[in-house]
Amino acid sequence: MVKPWKRLLWIKQEDYPDNYTDPAFIDLITRLRYKGKSAKPSNNSSSVHQIRSDLFRFYNKLLNTVFVYIIFVFIYNYRVNPVSFAIFVTILVSWLLSRSNAKHYAFGVKSSLVITFAMLTLSPILKSLSKTTASDSIWTLSFWLSIAYVGSLSSNVNAQTSNLSTNLLLAIVILLASRFQSTAHVFCFLLICVQLNVILPNLINLSNKYISFTINLSVYGFLTCTLGWSYTFLALAMSFFYLFVLPQWFVYWQTYYRGYESSLSRVWEAQKPILD
Amino acid sequence: MVVYIFWPKHLKSKELHLNDDNMCAISICLQSTDHIVLDIVPRRLLEKEALSAPYSIIGTKNSGEANWKFGEANDYCTIEFYVPNLKVLQFFSLEPIPLTQLGNAANTTVKKADYKNFEKLCNHPRYQSHDDRLRRNLSLLNLFDSHHESFVKRYHSLHIKSVNVSARLGTMMRKKCRSSSLRNIVSTFTVHLVVNMVKVAYSVSSFLNWRYTQLVNISVLAQQIDLRAQQICYFPVQYLLINEHHSIGKTPPKIEFSSEDSSQWKEELPCKYYPDYIRFYNTVWLILNDISFGMIVGSLVYDHADQISMHLHRAIGFSLYHFPKAITISLSNNPLGIKLNHELAKFFSELFLWVIEFSNVLFVGPMIEINNLKCFLRVVSQLGCVFGGTFALSIIVDYFAILTFHIYTFHRISSKLYHWQLVILLSLFHLFRGKKNNILRNRIDHNYFKLDQLLLGTIFFIILVFLLPTVLMFYLFFTTLRMVTIDVEIFLESIIALLNHFPLFALLLRLKDPKRIPGGITMNELGPGRLDLKSKPIKISEMFKPFVLLMEQMKDIYFSSKTSRQIFLGLPFVTHRRKLYQILYSSLPSTPIDIRTFRNKLSPHIKKKD
């Protein structure tokens, strides 16, 4: 009985003739053929619901970051005074913190105080940072930084927000804040954005029905008010595609198309070269 | 087997003179050398006397014949040469004589690890020179005159001697003078004077080179004084070295017939002390040249001190006060259209403006006021007349360095700020990516930062990124100013180096009599079986080698890609002046000779003169 043939790189296998075919291989191929089609539906594809919930989480996070731009536009274009909103958000966050103090001690009183006072001290410097730079370069920079930020977000449920994504977000916020004329505006803007995007997602679940509904409503409402219905429709259509069509399509691909090549190559080809 | 016979060219005229006689050529042949023809004598004189080793008859020529007949057994090849006149220090040498002790400077670059392999390579027979025979032949050739004299002494009958009356008289007078008591007093006096001067010079040199405050590195004047002190220390040693071997031309070497090894001749040849001879006279000549140069330039400057000081006042005032001030003000107002951070630029320009004003009031202004300049120029020119042009130039270089001190401080301040900013920026960039520099393992690792650390780090990072162009502009401006002052200093220092170490003596020797600085031998073919041996003088580029090396070193320190990297990173230029010019000090020993050893060397001479 000959040993089952294994594909070993760079090792001359003397025992087998040149046109040798392992019987186990023929078995595998016949099993793979199914109703004349080339692949059998794989059993271990994920469910549509699972994928949709993952995508939904990412979608909510994305919408959360749009708040940064909303607040910026309010302060820059519409010259709304952000102090009241900042106080409101601060009270909200501190109430949430004291409610779940035991679990999330990462942000204790001391560190929040440090952060607050540091931002307060550095606001005048931040205000004067890019005074001489043209607005267009700032918008371009922040656009590319946002693309980088979205790319660095991880979709894993249990992972904490990575350092890089936090830093990128902070970079965007500081860049935009340098456009303001008043120190108080800079400080409030910083405070709001940090609280909304960094602290809040750790305290509440963004995929909660009510919260998600509020976020969606505010974002699309703002979009309608500022840019008009056409843009809202476009955004809604893209979100609809993303949330309802994409998971189905992905699962279909996973079931019917991912199986054949990978199952064949995973068995009959060494994943890592065995160097002896 | 070819036998080589060395044939002196002056014998050809003697050959023509004795053409109608049957002639024999007498040669000397020591152990492991070839035959060297000493003389041509008529055969009839030889019939009475027989020659013993190492002399022998190598060839014969009958009257009327054209060519010499040597023995039939072997192939003979004659090598013709002009006899080197040892009294004027002409000689043959296979390698160029070492005009500089470059080994001192070159040794520092050899690493210990590489040296063992190099030794192994050198010990392989393939890379060893097999020119022993040629060397012995050449040393025999160099001592031709003394061998000829001893040959003549042994076989009187073969020569007619003419008495040189004037030479006899001269030697008689010299012998008489040697024993006079006046000479004793004068010699002891000079010896004590020289010893005291050497003591003073040695202490000055060690003071200037004191380990804790290396004055030699800071001031050019100190370096110049140190050089002169070391030269003074070395003069007596050189003089002794030269005179110990001075008797070589006067007494012929005794030939021991039992040991005919000609390698012992090498020690008595001028090869060993000749470089010192050249260096000694070169230094003396250069010092005299220096003083005369100083006198010429000094008197010129003294006469025109008024005009010169007026022009200098205007030029220096503009370049050291008005120009930096103007540029600093313009840097705070968006120079060249580059948008700088307004607050920071204003702060920097105010800071530097204040320092410029302060330095102007404190030292630049007084130093370049017309009257003070006049006074300074007059003093410098007078000092230059007394001590030499190099002294005056080094004072000028130091004066200039003090004048531009404020630019030096600007450069240091701005380079430090820039460097710190770069370092902090790099570290914060690692934080931005979420990583930290692991010093223990010397790599970048992932780190779990707390939120406040992240926030503060990112804020500082962005602030520093935006402030970088401002700092960079100021840094570049001051660095260019500093580079310009360094260029001026280098230019003046090169002139001083040229005045101090120009190989004048060797060059003039080369012009006057190329045979006195041999750099090798050449052999040309004159005809079948005849070669012509000539001495090749040292190439002029060889003589200037230390300068070329110095220029390359300076280029490496100030104008290479290493410099650009240093500028880019904000690191300062640190030059050790002593190490830079070490290559030129190669004509002196690396440390001045201790006074006690010097005394010991001198004492036998004091006793001899008594």
Image: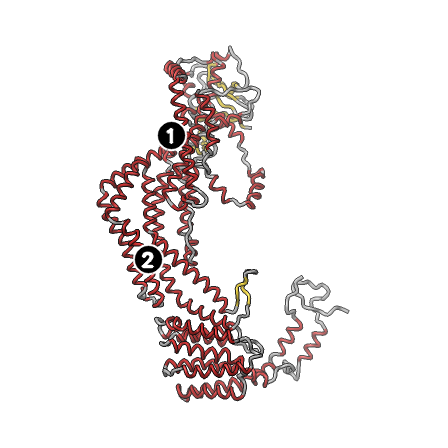
Image x and y of residue B110, in percent: 51, 44
Name the image quarter holding residue B388.
Answer: top left
Q: For this view, does B203 lie left or right of residue B450?
A: left
Question: Disc 2 marks which residue?
Answer: B355
Q: For mark 2, give the secondary structure.
A: helix
In the rendered image, the quadrant that contains the C terminus of chain B is top left
Q: Is residue B54 above or below residue A28?
A: above
What residue is shown at x 40% (from left), y 39% (from top)? B226
Can residue B220 be seen here? The reply is: yes
Which mark identifies residue B513? Answer: 1
Task: Name which quarter of the figure residue A275 lies in.
Answer: bottom right
Here the colouring is secondary structure
Q: Amino acid at mark 2?
A: Val
Q: Name the subunit of mark 1.
A: B
Q: Is residue B376 above or below residue B429?
A: above
- Please state which amino acid type lies under the numbered disc 1: Asp
Q: Can residue B535 be seen in this snapshot?
A: no
Q: Residue furthest top?
A: B48
